[in-house]
Image (cartoon, helix red, strand yellow):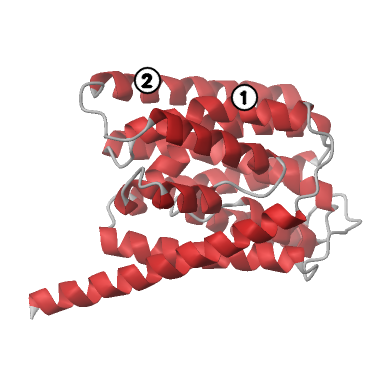
């Protein structure tokens, strides 16, 4: 089954690469005014820690906003497109080294893909104001999961080896929702970890499930963003290439790292960014309502 999943990842990766490179080539003379160096550094740093389980979307959003590398409306598409290659590599590694019940893994992966495909089509047509509000609340939710994990409110243990019956159905529906939320900028890693813990699976099972879910949902979701032109081309490619190197370094060279301090810093940045985006979104909404009147 691992070989089948690897082959599927390769097919998804080839399809995504073709769509991305074709779109980039078609617009190579109309690229955004952003920095290759800044986006490259952001992509490397974020995906290094992403491979270790911290998650990429929340800190990446904060860094992109702080350095003004993309506009809010294109943030969801940029995040998905930029992290697709690195997530495919993560999934290939962790699905190989960590054993998870086949039926449980496949069902959760498929449902995440379905959720992402539906969600991406909706998000690509949303207004800037709505994007700001959704992403602001999404960041705060993500920070909440990360805070709960750091405070040990989410128990990292479990002895169930497989999900069946109603529990598997619940897991499938939950991962469908997480897949859809992924397209609006809320990272799947932290909530997927919480889901795995809550269902009683071993904590380590979260890695192939969450990384596999993202690896299968991100190519189709990203292709939708690419076709809609709802992403920052230069920023996405600038982050994508260095992120692959970051994943390989984190997965094969770094054996252990105390992430407590780093995680607290990320939580603080994410909370601040989420609050600011919500405030900006509400201010913009009030302005728009005033213009109508």
**Residue 242 percent across, percent down from the top left:** 54, 27
The quadrant of the picture occupied by the N terminus is top right
| Residue on which disc 1 sits | 245
Residue at the image point whose x is 32% and y is 35% from the top? 34
Element at label 1: helix
Q: Is residue 109 visible?
A: yes
- Disc 1 crowd rating (10 Å Cα; few below 14, some 14-19, many 20+) is some
**Residue 259 percent across, percent down from the top left:** 75, 50
Give the quadrant of residue 7: top right
In the rendered view, tell whether residue 226 sits above or below residue 265. Answer: above
Give the number of marks.
Answer: 2
In the rendered view, tell whether residue 3 sits above or below residue 287. Answer: above
Give the quadrant of residue 79: top left
Question: Tag on residue 95?
Answer: none
**Residue 134 percent across, percent down from the top left:** 40, 64
Question: Tag on residue 21?
Answer: 2
**Residue 256 percent across, percent down from the top left:** 84, 40
Q: Nearer the viewer, residue 91 or 52?
A: 52
- Mark 1–mark 2 distance (CA, rounded to whole Å): 19 Å
Label 1 or label 2, whichever comes before in sequence order: 2
Element at label 2: helix
Give the quadrant of residue 22: top left
């Amino acid at each position: 089954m691992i070989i089948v999943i690897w082959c599927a990842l390769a097919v998804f990766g080839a399809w995504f690469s073709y769509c991305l490179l074709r779109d980039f080539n078609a617009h190579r003379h109309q690229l955004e005014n952003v920095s290759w160096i800044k986006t490259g550094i952001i992509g490397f740093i974020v995906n290094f820690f992403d491979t270790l389980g911290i998650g990429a979307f929340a800190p990446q959003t904060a860094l992109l906003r702080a350095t003004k590398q993309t506009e809010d409306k294109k943030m969801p598409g940029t995040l998905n497109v930029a992290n697709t290659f690195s997530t495919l590599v993560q999934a290939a590694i962790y699905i190989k080294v960590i054993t998870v019940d086949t039926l449980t893994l496949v069902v959760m992966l498929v449902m995440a893909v379905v959720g992402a495909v539906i969600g991406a089509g909706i998000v690509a047509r949303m207004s800037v104001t709505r994007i700001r509000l959704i992403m602001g609340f999404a960041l705060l939710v993500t920070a909440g999961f990360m805070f709960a994990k750091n405070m040990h409110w989410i128990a990292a243990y479990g002895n169930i080896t497989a999900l069946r019956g109603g529990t598997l159905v619940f897991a499938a529906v939950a991962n469908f929702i997480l897949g859809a939320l992924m397209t609006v900028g809320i990272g799947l890693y932290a909530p997927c970890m919480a889901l795995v813990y809550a269902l009683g699976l071993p904590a380590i099972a979260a890695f192939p499930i969450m990384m596999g879910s993202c690896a299968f949902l991100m190519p189709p979701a990203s292709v939708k963003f690419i076709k809609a032109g709802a992403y920052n081309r230069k920023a996405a490619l600038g982050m994508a290439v260095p992120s692959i190197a970051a994943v390989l370094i984190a997965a094969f060279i770094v054996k252990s790292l105390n992430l407590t301090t780093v995680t607290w810093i990320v939580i603080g940045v994410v909370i601040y960014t989420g609050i600011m985006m919500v405030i900006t979104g509400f201010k913009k909404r009030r302005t728009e309502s005033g213009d109508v009147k």
